[in-house]
Image: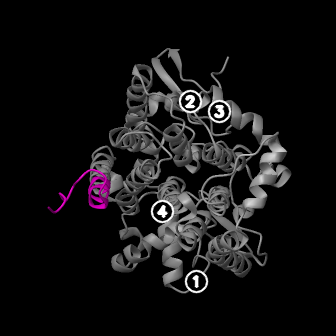
Amino acid sequence: MRPRLLAPGSRTRRIVLGLMVYAFCTAVFFASAARDRILEHSPYNHYALLADCWLHGRLDMAGPPPPYAQGNDFALYKDRWYVSFPPFPAVWLLPWVKIAGRVENVRDGQAFLWLAGVGPAVLWLALEKLRRTGKSDRSEWVNLSLALLFAFGTVYWFTAEQGTVWFAAHVVGVALAALFVLAAIDAEHPVLAGLLLGFAFLTRPPTLLMGLVFAGEALRMSVGGTFPEARGGWLAHAWAAARAIHVPTLARKWGLFLVPLVGLGLLYLWYNHARFGNAFAAGHEYLTVAWRERIEKWGLFSYHYLARNLGVVLTSLPWVTKDPWSVQINVHGLALWVTTPMYLWLLWPRKTGWQYWLYATSALAVALPDLLYQNTGWMQFGFRFSNDFAVLLFVLLALGGRRFGKAFWSAAVFAVAVNGFGAMTFDRQPFSRFYYVDGSQKTIYQPD
């Protein structure tokens, strides 16, 4: 008797449900998007401008940025203007620009809305792979819920609605992060994992540190999938694991993983050198922005910025004004536990192990450069840089084994409500009254 097409556990069922997640998320993202993001080009269509440069055989722009972009985040080097953002998202817009003929005819916000459902759908496939291989005991229904909560219970929702250069990079980065995790589980597809991580790096550079996931998974598989037990302390365990490593297997997986990753890295170094005469100059050093002075003084990444960034991530709350009455949200963004309180469940996992700590270490590694960066993500509804490591955090929610009871699902409902508000009000009229903007970026908390 032939199995049913959508039989539980079948590959077809996973794919069909994944497509359903994509379709549902995409429909909601379009329904909650501002009309002009669907029907017009965004004011900060840097990736469309970059794609147009490539199609005309140029690395720089033919002249100054268009007036509608207000000179926002363009690099000026030796009297030439450049789009300095990591370039991979512009690849998606190449056919859009080619077909449209002119950059201003490209609906870049709509183009990235079509991609926004990919990340949650692939996250579902990754969570199911963890369940299928016995690493997670979450049910199919819970995994579906987690994928949808990623889409609508995190800052990803408001991110997906913007379409502008800073947020478009996160949409592409999330899709690549989820695809990378899917390929990296059990180090099953080393070449593909290396290629995806390279693309992720060329989209959001901090995601390069997700490579720890593949390195650790390959190490685990080189000892047969489970590290051997040993009597004694952690040194005895480490020595037993080291002796059990099958070096040819480990070398093969690491090698296949590194070939495309290193190749893309070298291509990026060439790209930088061709533009700025320095392989290690990505271009943000030459941004014509008001806070260029602080970049020159402290650098793009510095411990100097850590306290401010942590303040936003952990303590930034809305406040109420009396005259006129209004709720105000600082555009440095709300604290991460306010927008996604489900992350608090990561503090008390019921079970841990090699994979749990591997993903946790990788998430912390990816978060560190974001916390040391020269701005907080301003302007934003919530901490948008968390998109860089949010896929890993949801994997940890699945691996942690803590039962999701009424408190968790209540927090999930709260998160959807909060992020729904952000998705449908941020950077839109007539909702600007809900947002506090200080162009100097110096005000983080409610003024005295």
Q: Nearer the viewer, mark 1 or mark 3?
A: 3
Q: CA distance from mark 3 to mark 2?
A: 29 Å
Q: Earlier in the sequence, mark 4 or mark 2?
A: 4
Q: Mark 1 falls on what kind of element?
A: loop
Q: Are marks 4 and 3 in contact (CB under 8 Å)?
A: no
On the rendered image, what quadrant is the C terminus found in?
A: top right
Q: CA distance from mark 4 to mark 2?
A: 45 Å
Q: What amino acid is found at the position of numbered circle 3 in the picture?
A: Val
Q: Earlier in the sequence, mark 1 or mark 3?
A: 1
Q: Residue 159, how many percent across, how many down?
A: 46, 47
Taking the image as drawn, is residue 105 in sight?
Answer: yes
In the current view of this chain or complex, which residue is farthest to the left? 1
Pointer 1 residue? 58
Q: Residue at x 68, y 39 (%)?
A: 440
Q: What amino acid is found at the position of numbered circle 2 in the picture?
A: Arg
Q: CA distance from mark 4 to mark 3?
A: 27 Å
